[in-house]
Image: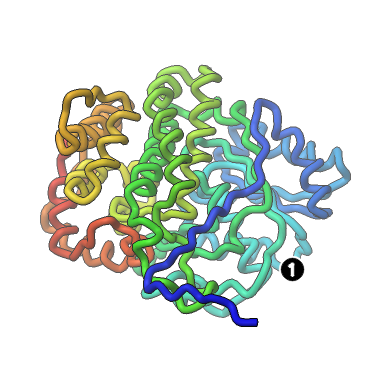
Amino acid sequence: MSFFTYTSPNDTVFTIRNVQVKFGEGVSSEVGYEARRLGIKKALIVTDKNLNENTKWPSIIEEFLEGEGIKSDIFDGTHIEPIDTEVIKAIEFAKNKDYDGFIAVGGGSSIDTGKMINLYTTYPTTDFKDYIAPPTGGGKPVPGPIKPLICIPTTAGTGSENTPVAIVDLTKEKLKVGISNPYLLPSYALLDPVLTVTLSPYYTASTGIDALMHCIECYTAIPYNCRPRPPSPDKRPVYIGSNPVSDLFVEKATELIGKYLRRAYYNPHDLEARRNMLLAAHLGGAFGNAGVHISHALAYPIAGRRHELPHGITVAVTGPAMLEFIEPIVPDKLARIAQLLGEKTEGLTIREAAALAKEALIKLMKDVNLPSGISEFGFEEKDLKELSEGAILQQRLLAVSPRPVNVQEIIEIYRKSLHNW
């Protein structure tokens, strides 16, 4: 029997890859049940020192595990943004200790560190950069499944609990890079809005704006069926471009962020706002299928030189100029973003409405007191060429940009981002 083979030069397949999730106040109490169900008998709780010392969440999670007869240790060495030297220390801490599962408690940094500990203790390498995407790393494929990882976010922003991606700063190269592989998708996520109440206004803003940038970039990514067909299924990239499912997810997430981020910022105990921001961040994790592009690529060299800056802030500061750059290519989608963020677009042309997306982003950034531009980080005109040379290396991200971008255009986006207002 012969079978018809479709031979279009374009890809015709998109991926729907979502973690299994439980959502609701108090759901973190079910971590022991889920860990036992996944066969975990000895777990490493991966968190950060601030969360471990200033809240009870990691120790409470430890008690929930103990209640199901599961042994656990707490590792609280996660950096504010994962740095290769610190991640290597975390891997050294965990190896040879017979952990058969991991529990990430914290923001995206703890979750990404948990992913990398899991990967490198399951499939060790001689060079940390082996699994990192080229051209910076070797691009070695993950050999197979890794151990169970349960994610319990305490921030509403990264959506890392729903992505097969881990991000890390390379100190020597002064660059933030990524490891992308379907096997990195966590096993389970417990989304408990109560755990986000202790998040400070500053980090509420930075993680919330990160979620919004995920949505904007995911929504405007090149359509999945405008990419070349891969030679085989295993060669299809993790980031495959915008698609009908990711569009649905991020439209809802964008609407929620426009409505609730300001409320969560100004009233940390507004549980309705916290609940909806956590949901928005998770839905925005659809970028783990579709991808993010220019602003994230431009954020990585900034973060590589300013490790102390929260990821969301380094992404958002180039957002307005990025929107201006892609507006001629995706005006209909930017017009929709403007609507979802509360702008009035009735009676306007598509291009006029699209221009309001940039204005809506700037309004939100101002309202939650985000930096006005990269000049506030100490960058000047003389730094832009070096930043751009780092950004252009992020082809894993730039490949899904709706508008191709070269070094000179990146320099101009950085220049406009020195001062957004």
Q: Is residue 75 left or right of residue 327?
A: right
Question: Nearest the camera: 188 or 106?
Answer: 188
Q: Quadrant of the N terminus?
A: bottom right
Q: In this view, does 349 lie to the left or right of 217?
A: left
| Picture coordinates of residue 230, whole percent (x, y) | 45, 74
Type of colouring: rainbow
Asked if residue 418 shows in the view, the reply is yes
Residue at (57, 43) in percent of width and height: 49
Asked if residue 305 shows in the view, the reply is no
Amino acid type, mark 1: Asn
Q: Is residue 128 above or below residue 249?
A: below
Residue 384's image quarter? bottom left
Question: Nearest the camera: 172 or 42?
Answer: 42
Q: Residue under label 1, please give it.
A: 96
Q: In this view, does 163 lie to the left or right of 325?
A: right
Check disc 1: other Cα within 10 Å, few if <14, some if 14-19, many if 20+. few
* Label 1 secondary element: loop
Residue 376's image quarter? top left
Question: Nearest the camera: 187 or 309?
Answer: 187
Q: Quadrant of the C terminus?
A: top left
| Picture coordinates of residue 227, whole percent (x, y) | 36, 66
Residue at (60, 60) in percent of width and height: 90
| Picture coordinates of residue 379, whole percent (x, y) | 19, 50
